[in-house]
């Protein structure tokens, strides 16, 4: 479905946003994981045809989107990071506006989208008074209004409360059927339950591209659990890659990603996606 | 309807709704309507809208329409630009531009839509102003209202200015080094210069035919008409004094003669070609190009001067930021933040200090001081609204006293900036013309108060820039003829009553701002 071949993006400052990156995604939800500044947004902007790669080729369903960007744009839904709204428009006007820009002139489709993101009851309220979650839901509605084959959402859950995050995640997981959804985040739990494939990016380079199960399998034997005293924990935390640490009455319950057993009483643990992500970073 | 036309219509409609639902639009419209009331005074006051060779024109539809349309054109040129020059920036800041860039919309299509949006907005705004001017025929008229005569005068005068300003706003937004505060200042001087060039050329009678095609302000057309019909070019529009003994003259309206048809159409359509320049610079929201635009802006001479002044501004900030958490210290820190954010202001302050020392008396009061105060106005325009625009109001409110005394805090901060920026001119005035000092001090406080009020109420720095520069332009062109307009004593005509009136206006506006702020806090 989507092929990214040796794509690089070099800025005039000489810095690379993305460097020699290649992968092929089929359908479903592709989680793009990486720390802040890893190059996720630059990659997504190149796929969304907003900026051109310095070198390399991106094609969607066999069509080179560098040469024919409009072929993709007709089937594209994009929700940028920190998406803002026009405060003085109502939700209905805002969505109708973007629908028109995308060539959708069906009022029923706009209403259907507002219902899908549960904003139909506030359709005639100006969006300036919406919460962050409501604005993000309106953002996803505009991304989907043209029934796209490729949906790109960049850090959609940043700044949302836990309830809104779950709601947003559910919307995205329903979308993956019959299309490709690319979801970038630095929060592993956002993609844990919905991603069918995961790409891990660090410093503009692709570190791993696999299914969540494969990533977790790769981390097998590298995750350890142990209980430490506060003093032991403080002494060891600088040298260990800590996945989680919970202070309890009997000590600090620590989960560590390490190739070798960190202490004699550490026991092997089943890797989570978070562990797998840390493991890939370590391997890189 | 084709897909392209539908997209353009959608953008024009959205821009229209966004702009007309902004409080700042209402503020500017109310102020413009108030200007209409002031510009058409009761002749019993000894002043009239149109005065030609000391005789006033009868208040009929043609005279009031021509007078208000001409003043409206000046207003469009000065204020309209600032009101509309955020069409592209809004999409960059909200990141809606990224979504637009991910659609099939062409860059030229987008710019054309934004340009039409500007034209529609300004036209609607002027139509509203025309209606309020029509109402003045009912209030002050000396003949029956004739709407068709009114509309004809507006159609003859206004369209070239609307199209020119709309296109220029798109160009200024697209060219990186013209898209910020520097561009705002460049535009102001560009427009005021362009106002005079065609008109003076026509007035002196040496105007070539081709120059008529550049008569965007319609002043050339106006003077030619007066020459042809009344055999004079001595015209005064907007509350000018007249000789009551002279007989009234009846103005029958501007006429479109055959030799002016092509130049009028040309002046209306030619500015559209400016969009080609805009297209050359437009980044189509490509983040790499937006970033480059930012870097290029830093490489302009203002950018370099800003960079050069930055260490001094930072040192000043570090020096001034000391001294505890008192209310005054907070205001001082906020003032230094203004200088740190726009270090070029430091060079400007030094420049005005040198000019104040070097200028002769007349030059000091009529050139240096007015320019220094206009520059000061641009520097302080965003002080009262920057937290709201940056989403950092919560940080300010968390500091002691600042939430409840927000208006006072911003006023004090603005006055601190005035001390840095206008300190030398104030000292010069105190030493050489102490009698003018109260008027100058009042003028500065008045400017600071209006900037604070409009910033708090409209949350948009451009509202103040628009209102103040228009007022400044009117006051300067009056050259002290009306004591009431000599707000800072530039012409030595400000009477104690005028000084007191401006003090009362400043206090009234601050009370309004405080009431508005308190109401907002109650609603929150």
Image: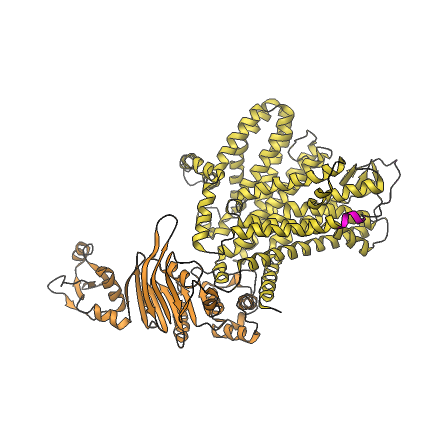
Q: Where residue B108 sits in the image (x, y, percent)?
A: 56, 57
Report if residue B103 is visible in the image: yes
Instruction: Find residue B352 and report its image quarter.
Output: top right
Q: Is residue B248 magenta?
A: yes
From the viewer's perspective, is B346 left or right of B60?
A: left
Q: Where residue A174 sits in the image (x, y, percent)?
A: 40, 76
Residue drawn at x 57%, y 72% is A105
Relative to the observer, which residue lies in front, A59 or A88?
A59
Magenta-drawn segment? B245-261
Residue drawn at x 70%, y 36% is B477
From the viewer's perspective, is B78 left or right of A3?
A: right
Relative to the observer, which residue lies in front, B426 or A228?
B426
- Of the 4 image quadrants, the one containing the N terminus of chain B is bottom right
Instruction: Find residue B433 and report its image quarter.
Output: top right
Residue drawn at x 56%, y 59% is B110
Q: Which residue lies furthest to the left in this view?
A: A264
Q: Where residue B97 sits in the image (x, y, percent)?
A: 50, 59
Q: Is residue B231 magenta?
A: no
Q: Chain A is drawn in which colour?
A: orange
Report if residue A244 is visible in the image: no
Instruction: Identify the main secondary structure in magenta.
Output: loop
From the viewer's perspective, is B373 left or right of B420?
A: right
Spot the yellow chain and give its letter. Answer: B
Q: Where residue B461 sits in the image (x, y, percent)?
A: 56, 47
Question: Is residue A177 positioned above or below B108 on the image?
Answer: below
């Amino acid at each position: 479905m989507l092929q990214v071949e040796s794509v690089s993006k070099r800025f005039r400052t000489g810095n690379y946003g993305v460097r020699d990156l290649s992968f092929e995604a089929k359908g479903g939800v592709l989680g793009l994981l990486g720390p802040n500044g890893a190059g996720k947004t630059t990659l997504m902007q190149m796929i969304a045809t907003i900026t051109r790669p310095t070198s390399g080729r991106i094609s969607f369903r066999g069509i080179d989107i560098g040469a024919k960007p409009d072929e993709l744009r007709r089937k594209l839904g994009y929700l940028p990071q920190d998406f803002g709204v026009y405060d003085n428009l109502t939700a209905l006007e805002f969505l109708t506006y973007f629908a028109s820009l995308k060539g959708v002139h069906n009022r029923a489709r706009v209403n259907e989208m507002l219902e899908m993101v549960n904003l139909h009851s506030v359709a005639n309220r100006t969006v300036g008074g919406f919460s962050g979650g409501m604005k993000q839901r309106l953002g996803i509605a505009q991304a989907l209004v043209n029934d796209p084959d490729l949906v790109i959402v960049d850090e959609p859950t940043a700044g949302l409360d836990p309830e809104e995050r779950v709601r947003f995640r559910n919307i995205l997981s329903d979308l993956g059927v019959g299309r490709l959804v690319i979801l970038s985040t630095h929060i592993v739990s956002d993609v844990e339950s919905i991603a069918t494939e995961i790409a891990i990016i660090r410093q503009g380079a692709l570190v791993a591209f696999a299914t969540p199960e494969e990533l977790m399998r790769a981390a097998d034997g590298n995750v350890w659990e142990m209980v430490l005293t506060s003093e032991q924990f403080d002494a060891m935390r600088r040298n260990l890659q800590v996945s989680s640490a919970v202070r309890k009455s009997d000590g600090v319950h620590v989960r560590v990603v390490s190739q070798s057993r960190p202490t004699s009483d550490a026991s092997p643990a089943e890797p989570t996606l978070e562990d797998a992500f840390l493991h890939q970073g370590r391997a890189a | 309807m084709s897909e392209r036309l539908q997209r353009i219509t959608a953008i024009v409609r959205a821009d229209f709704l966004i702009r007309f639902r902004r409080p700042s639009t209402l503020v500017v419209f109310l102020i413009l309507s108030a200007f209409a009331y002031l510009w058409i005074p009761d002749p019993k006051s000894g002043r009239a809208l149109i005065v030609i060779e000391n005789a006033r024109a009868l208040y009929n539809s043609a005279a009031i329409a021509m007078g208000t349309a001409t003043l409206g054109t000046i207003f469009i040129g000065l204020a309209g630009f600032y009101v509309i020059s955020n069409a592209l920036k809004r999409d960059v800041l909200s990141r809606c531009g990224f979504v637009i860039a991910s659609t099939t919309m062409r860059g030229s299509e987008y710019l054309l839509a934004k340009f039409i949006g500007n034209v529609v907005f300004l036209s609607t705004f002027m139509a509203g102003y025309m209606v309020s001017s029509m109402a003045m025929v009912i209030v002050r008229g000396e003949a029956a209202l004739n709407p068709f005569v009114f509309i004809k005068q507006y159609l003859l005068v206004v369209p070239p200015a609307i199209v020119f300003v709309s296109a220029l706003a798109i160009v200024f937004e697209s060219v990186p080094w013209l898209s910020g505060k520097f561009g705002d200042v460049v535009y102001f001087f560009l427009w005021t210069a362009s106002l005079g060039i065609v008109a003076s050329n026509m007035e002196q009678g040496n105007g070539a035919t081709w120059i008529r095609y550049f008569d965007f302000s319609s002043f050339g057309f106006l003077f030619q008409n007066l020459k042809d019909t009344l055999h004079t070019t001595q015209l005064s529009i907007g509350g000018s004094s007249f000789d009551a003994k002279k007989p009234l003259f009846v103005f029958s309206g501007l006429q479109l003669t055959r030799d002016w048809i092509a130049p009028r159409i040309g002046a209306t359509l030619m500015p559209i070609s400016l969009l080609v320049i805009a297209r050359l610079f437009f980044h189509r929201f490509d983040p790499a190009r937006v970033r480059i635009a930012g870097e290029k802006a830093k490489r302009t001479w203002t950018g370099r001067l800003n960079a050069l002044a930055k260490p001094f501004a930072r040192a000043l900030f570090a020096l001034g930021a000391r001294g505890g958490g008192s209310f005054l210290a907070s205001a001082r820190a906020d003032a230094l933040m203004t200088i740190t954010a726009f270090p070029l202001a430091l060079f400007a302050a030094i420049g005005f200090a040198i000019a104040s020392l070097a200028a002769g008396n007349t030059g000091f009061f009529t050139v240096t001081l007015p320019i220094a105060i206009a520059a000061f106005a641009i520097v302080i325009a965003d002080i009262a609204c920057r937290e709201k625009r940056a989403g950092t109001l919560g940080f300010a409110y968390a500091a002691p006293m600042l939430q409840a005394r927000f208006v006072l805090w911003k006023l004090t901060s603005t006055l601190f900036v005035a001390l840095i920026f206008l300190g030398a001119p104030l000292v010069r005035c105190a030493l050489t013309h102490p009698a003018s000092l109260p008027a100058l001090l009042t003028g500065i406080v008045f400017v600071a108060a209006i900037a604070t009020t409009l910033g708090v109420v409209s949350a948009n720095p451009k509202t103040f820039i628009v209102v103040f520069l228009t007022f400044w332009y009117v006051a300067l062109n009056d050259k002290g003829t009306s004591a009431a307009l000599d707000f800072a004593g530039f012409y030595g005509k400000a009477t104690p009553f005028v000084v007191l009136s401006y003090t009362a206006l400043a206090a009234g506006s601050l009370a309004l701002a405080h009431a508005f702020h308190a109401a907002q806090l109650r609603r929150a």
